[in-house]
Image (spheres, rainbow, N blue to C red):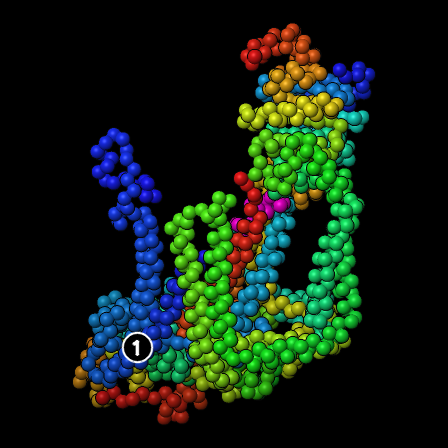
């Protein structure tokens, strides 16, 4: 499916992270290649969200190294800003800016971070709304949209920066069941278009269908790392088997 | 509502509930009860005030106190420490001087407290330990000391400064002394009004320029710098106007002509205009109310409250119209001794306004704005005092202004801090995730949202500040309360003066909360 | 919107009702005036259904005071030598002694007084609202106060006049005039006649002044001492008192020689309570009559055979009992408090105020202190 010799875009090496006494990440080492779609699965509190939040520095890791597109995440503010503009993120709670219209939500970062002219930014914004299927909502405010529509706007907002990697932090967990599909469809389309994606989710169907690799997290470490086929049909570890038996 | 009411016996008769569209008895009809309750409340309140008023009048007459308003036009006879007229010729004029002093403190205090409070509130959230601690210490000290004590403190501080001596005579950019503070300042000069008119024209022009540039940008897709062009236009008008404003001298005649025209109108015009404004205002309000009730499916059904509001608006409009005509008949004596009707006074006021304006357009080639330093001079029989140039802040003004500003700023800081904290953490993360810098997301994401949370409690602080200025009485600040006390002492008319105070503070508070409410409505988040 | 309109209506109603009352005023006042003329003990207007508690009650202020067993007397509390509040809540001074004199007359005990310290601005409201029974707080008797505000004045106990205090090092002398205050910042306290006097006086002599009105006179002194105010002005007696206590090196000077205003100071009581008014008036007169006859607290005797003194002390006639007092009421005043000269000398001589050569000398020595005969 994806080329084997694609270059590494995210390299995590022995990443450790503590919240006070609690160690959330206990030495995570993994590599994500360009155009790869990685789905992270695991029980809650296993550190999967923490890992992707570390990748764009919403949380700071304390040991090990994270390199994104050749830039190491350190305390250098310029590196952090550079990486953040290369990495898009979609949150569980959408986190749209409620005081701005849908279109303004999308054009904000291109205008202020990329310094694009407004006309260009708005044109790109409308194209993205077209792509997520809600161009008619451009002038509305987030509060006027349904949850599924809001999450699609959030995806469009992240895409507007033309990121190299998209991070999804449980994008469908806060949605009503009938809206989950419309968001997953957008994500599938995105994966097929060749976007590098790391998705934390409980949607096993999505993982099976779209993922190149599935990582299973438990107690802050990667327990299982393999193709969806391998993961769902032939898991190696007892903990993985236990987890799968509980959810499938 | 009728559907909800079954006939009393219908329910018991059959298991199948039958809908009976009979009108309910009056004492159970919610619609009737509501109307009666509203009217009863109105009548009760009016009756209560009538009762209190007549009792008060009876007691006043019993204890030989006469109650009247003559003191408003009688000579005041006492100098006022500071203000637009330190030697007012009538009681009304003196109260106006006091009211302007109150407004000076209140308005400038509101602006200063907002700026300082916002800075301190943001500093309180700063990750810089020292800045954070300083802000905390400021808030804790100021909040926990009674305002009156603080005002006394600032008063004592100024009184403790050194006196002005002969060596100080001359001009100063800044001079502190126990006679107050002198500051250099910019003032409108002789050419200010013509220049301002040119700048206003420039503002209008800038709006068009900006629209043109925006259209250009949309057509070509290239950045057209519409804001830069707009600023440039205003700056150009301001700059050119600075030199050419004397050419507007001819307008002097125009203003005079308008003033003469208004002055020549029969006084009944005023009544007609007021009546028309009242009726049209009511009609507009009712129409707009209907519009707000209109849905795509047609008019929504009016509730009883809605009808009550419409009737009330109509009555108020009618009332204003009647007052308008009543003004034509009511006459009062001016301090000058002329007897004029209120309508004539209003008309003359407008007429005088235009004549005043005409005076400002004399074609004088002086600059629009002058810079003036504070000066110290030897006055009269050898007293070293501040002169009239620059801005002179008297010790009482300083004590009240600094007192209420710092005090209110501490509360505003806490409100700002709370408002910022109330914006969810997710907003910060989302803004960071799209790559916005801290300064950018504070300005574009956090503050606009925090502002919506902050505004209503901020309005309360503004009201507090405005009302707290009356504490200036304690340090001899000549506000409306202090001047009113002097009036009471000179005339003994305590109740009328208290009524004037109440009317003044109620009006000021209503205006402040009106402005705050207007913005609050405008900024409300759009939600489903 | 409706709320605001209600408020507006309410205020309008109040104003309308209050204005409507003005015409009633004159009628009732006329009735009351007739009552004043009769010698019977009537308090206020009898046709008044809703009068206030103090005077509406049977017997007026006298009955209230007797029932309470204590006189509540409004004083300054901070006027040097006139009324100075002590640590135990009582007050000493010229005005305070007249409070004691009234208590001695009404209750037979000069110490049955509760002193209430009031600012100049508060005093009249306190009197009108029945918070105090009598106001003895160096209050100037003026036409407007006497007629407008619902109170009446007792005979003058101290003839004062407003003066200005400045510094010798600024070139002021005892011979300075109001013209020399041109350009100065003057401080005085609120709620007195001094504000108006200085405004008018300065304007008449062509001087432009800045007038700073502070809450109490001690504040005016504080600002004068600090230099925030160049000059301070109030009644001459007040200036003399402050200079005596605070100016040890004679750096200050009081001018002009002829005061810029007449300030007759005396007790004040509520209007339309003629019985109470008579008691205050004659307590003051009793101290003056005693002084004229050289009767002092030391030599006063109810066996005095001079007819006027005998009548005054209750030895013959029923002058006092007709007023609602004990027959020996004024005897108590003289023995417990003293005659006018004793009260004056005891309190005012120490701060440099003397009777000789002033209006406060007895009438037969060129002064104005004079009492009608007691008979």
Which image quarter: residue B151? bottom right
Out of A145 and C236, give the one closest to the viewer: A145
**Magenta span contains residue B516:** no
* Residue under the image location 63 percent in, 42 percent down: A139
**Range drawn in magenta:** B446-459
- Residue position marked by numbered label 1 in the rendering: C24
Relative to B383, is B1 above or below?
above
Q: Is residue A20 left or right of residue C191?
A: right
Which image quarter: residue B368? bottom right
* Residue under the image location 53 percent in, 70 percent down: B98
Number of other residues with Cα within 10 Å of mark 1, as a class: few under 14, some 14 to 19, many 20 or more:
some
Which image quarter: residue A136? top right
Q: Position of residue B185 (x, y in %)?
A: 70, 67
Q: Is residue C46 left or right of residue B230?
A: left
**Residue A219 visible here:** no
Out of C257 and B368, give the one closest to the viewer: B368
Magenta-highlighted stretch: main secondary structure?
helix
């Amino acid at each position: 499916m994806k080329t084997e010799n694609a270059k590494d875009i995210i390299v995590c090496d022995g990443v450790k992270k503590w919240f006070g006494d609690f160690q959330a990440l206990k030495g995570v080492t993994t590599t994500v290649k360009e155009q790869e779609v990685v789905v992270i699965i695991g029980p809650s509190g296993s550190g999967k969200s923490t890992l992707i939040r570390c990748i764009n520095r919403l949380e700071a890791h304390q040991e090990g190294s994270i390199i994104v597109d050749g830039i190491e995440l350190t305390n250098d503010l310029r590196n952090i800003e550079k990486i953040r503009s290369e990495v898009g993120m979609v949150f569980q709670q959408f986190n749209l800016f409620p005081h701005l219209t849908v279109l303004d939500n999308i054009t904000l970062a291109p205008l202020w971070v990329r310094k694009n002219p407004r006309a260009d930014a708005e044109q790109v914004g409308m194209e993205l709304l077209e792509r997520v299927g809600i161009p008619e909502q451009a002038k509305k405010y987030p509060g006027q949209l349904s949850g599924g529509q809001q999450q699609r706007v959030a995806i469009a907002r992240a895409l507007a920066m033309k990121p190299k990697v998209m991070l999804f932090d449980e994008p469908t967990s806060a949605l009503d069941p009938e809206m989950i599909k419309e968001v997953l469809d957008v994500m599938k389309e995105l994966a097929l278009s060749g976007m590098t994606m790391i998705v934390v989710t409980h949607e096993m169907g999505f993982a099976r269908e779209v993922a190149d690799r599935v990582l299973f997290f438990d107690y802050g470490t990667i327990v299982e790392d393999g193709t969806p086929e391998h993961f769902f049909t032939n898991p190696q570890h007892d903990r993985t088997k236990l987890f799968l038996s509980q959810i499938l | 509502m009728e559907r909800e009411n079954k006939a009393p016996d219908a329910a018991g008769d059959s298991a199948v509930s039958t809908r009976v569209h009979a009108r309910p008895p009056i004492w159970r009809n919610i619609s009737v009860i509501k109307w009666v309750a509203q009217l009863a409340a109105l009548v009760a309140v009016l009756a209560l005030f009538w009762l209190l008023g007549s009792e008060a009048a009876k007691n006043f007459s019993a204890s030989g106190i006469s109650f009247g308003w003559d003191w408003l036009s009688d000579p005041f006879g006492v100098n006022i420490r500071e203000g637009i007229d330190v030697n007012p010729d009538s009681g009304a004029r003196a109260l106006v001087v006091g009211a302007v002093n109150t407004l000076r403190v209140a308005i400038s205090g509101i602006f200063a407290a907002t700026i300082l409070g916002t800075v301190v509130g943001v500093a309180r959230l700063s990750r810089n330990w020292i800045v954070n601690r300083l802000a905390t210490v400021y808030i804790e000290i100021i909040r926990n000391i009674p305002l009156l004590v603080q005002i006394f403190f600032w008063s004592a501080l100024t009184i403790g400064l050194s006196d002005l001596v002969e060596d100080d005579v001359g001009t100063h950019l800044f001079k502190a002394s126990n006679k107050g503070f002198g500051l250099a300042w910019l003032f409108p000069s002789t050419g200010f009004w013509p220049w301002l008119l040119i700048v206003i024209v420039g503002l209008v022009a800038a709006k068009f320029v900006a629209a043109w540039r925006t259209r250009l940008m949309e057509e070509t897709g290239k950045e057209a710098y519409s804001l830069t062009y707009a600023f440039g236009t205003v700056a150009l008008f301001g700059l050119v106007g600075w030199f050419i404003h004397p050419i507007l001298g001819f307008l002097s005649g125009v203003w005079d002509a308008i003033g003469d025209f208004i002055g020549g109108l029969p006084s009944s015009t005023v009544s007609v205009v007021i009546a028309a404004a009242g009726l049209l205002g009511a009609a507009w309000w009712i129409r707009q109310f209907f519009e707000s009730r209109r849905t795509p499916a047609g008019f929504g059904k009016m509730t009883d409250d809605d009808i009550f509001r419409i009737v009330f608006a109509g009555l108020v409009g009618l009332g204003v119209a009647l007052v308008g005509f009543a003004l034509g008949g009511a006459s009062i004596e001016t301090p000058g001794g002329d007897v004029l009707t209120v309508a004539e006074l209003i008309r003359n006021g407008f007429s005088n306004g235009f004549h005043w304006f005409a005076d400002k357009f004399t074609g004088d080639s002086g600059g629009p704005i002058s810079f003036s330093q504070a000066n110290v001079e030897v006055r009269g029989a050898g007293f070293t005092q501040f002169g009239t140039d620059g801005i002179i802040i008297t010790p009482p003004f300083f004590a009240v202004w600094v007192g209420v500003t710092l005090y209110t700023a501490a509360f505003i800081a806490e409100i700002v801090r709370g408002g910022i904290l109330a914006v969810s953490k997710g907003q910060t993360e989302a803004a960071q995730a799209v790559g916005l810098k801290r300064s950018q997301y504070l300005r574009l994401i956090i503050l606009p949202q925090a502002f919506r949370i902050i505004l209503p409690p901020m309005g309360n602080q503004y009201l507090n500040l405005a009302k707290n200025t009356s504490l200036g009485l304690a340090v001899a600040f000549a506000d409306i309360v202090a001047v009113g006390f002097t009036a009471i002492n000179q005339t003994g008319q305590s109740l009328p003066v208290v009524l004037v105070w109440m009317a003044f503070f109620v009006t000021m508070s209503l205006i402040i909360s009106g402005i705050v409410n207007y913005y609050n409505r405008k900024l409300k988040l759009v939600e489903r | 919107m409706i709320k605001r309109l209600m408020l507006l209506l309410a205020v309008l109603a109040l104003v309308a009702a209050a204005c409507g009352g003005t015409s009633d005023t004159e009628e009732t006042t006329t009735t009351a005036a007739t009552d004043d003329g009769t010698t019977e003990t009537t308090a206020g207007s009898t046709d008044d259904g809703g009068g206030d508690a103090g005077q509406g009650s049977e017997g007026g202020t006298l009955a209230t005071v007797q029932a309470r067993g204590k006189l509540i007397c409004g004083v300054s509390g901070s006027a040097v030598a006139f009324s100075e509040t002590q640590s135990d809540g009582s007050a000493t001074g010229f005005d305070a002694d007249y409070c004691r004199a009234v208590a001695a007359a009404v209750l037979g005990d000069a110490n049955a007084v509760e002193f209430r310290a009031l600012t100049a601005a508060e005093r009249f409201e306190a009197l009108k609202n029945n918070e105090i029974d009598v106001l003895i707080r160096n209050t100037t008797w003026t036409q407007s106060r006497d007629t407008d505000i619902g109170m009446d004045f007792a005979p003058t106990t101290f003839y004062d006049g407003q003066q200005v205090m400045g510094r010798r090092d600024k070139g002021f002398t005892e011979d300075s005039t109001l013209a020399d205050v041109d350009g100065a910042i003057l401080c005085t306290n609120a709620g007195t006649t001094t504000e108006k006097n200085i405004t008018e006086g300065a304007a008449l002599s062509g001087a432009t002044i800045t007038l700073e009105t502070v809450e109490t006179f001690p504040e005016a002194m504080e600002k004068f001492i600090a230099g925030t105010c160049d000059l301070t002005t109030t009644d001459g007696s007040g200036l003399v008192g402050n200079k005596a206590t605070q100016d040890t090196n004679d750096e200050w000077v009081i001018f002009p020689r002829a005061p810029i205003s007449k300030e007759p100071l005396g007790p004040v009581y509520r209007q339309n309570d003629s019985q109470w008014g008579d008691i205050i008036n004659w307590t003051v007169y009793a101290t003056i009559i005693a002084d004229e006859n050289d009767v002092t607290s030391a030599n006063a005797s109810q066996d005095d055979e001079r007819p006027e003194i005998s009548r005054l002390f209750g030895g013959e006639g029923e002058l006092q009992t007709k007023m609602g007092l004990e027959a020996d009421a004024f005897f108590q005043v003289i023995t417990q408090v003293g005659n006018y000269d004793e009260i004056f000398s005891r309190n005012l001589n120490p701060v440099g105020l003397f009777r000789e050569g002033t209006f406060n000398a007895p009438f037969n020595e060129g002064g104005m202190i004079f009492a009608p005969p007691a008979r």
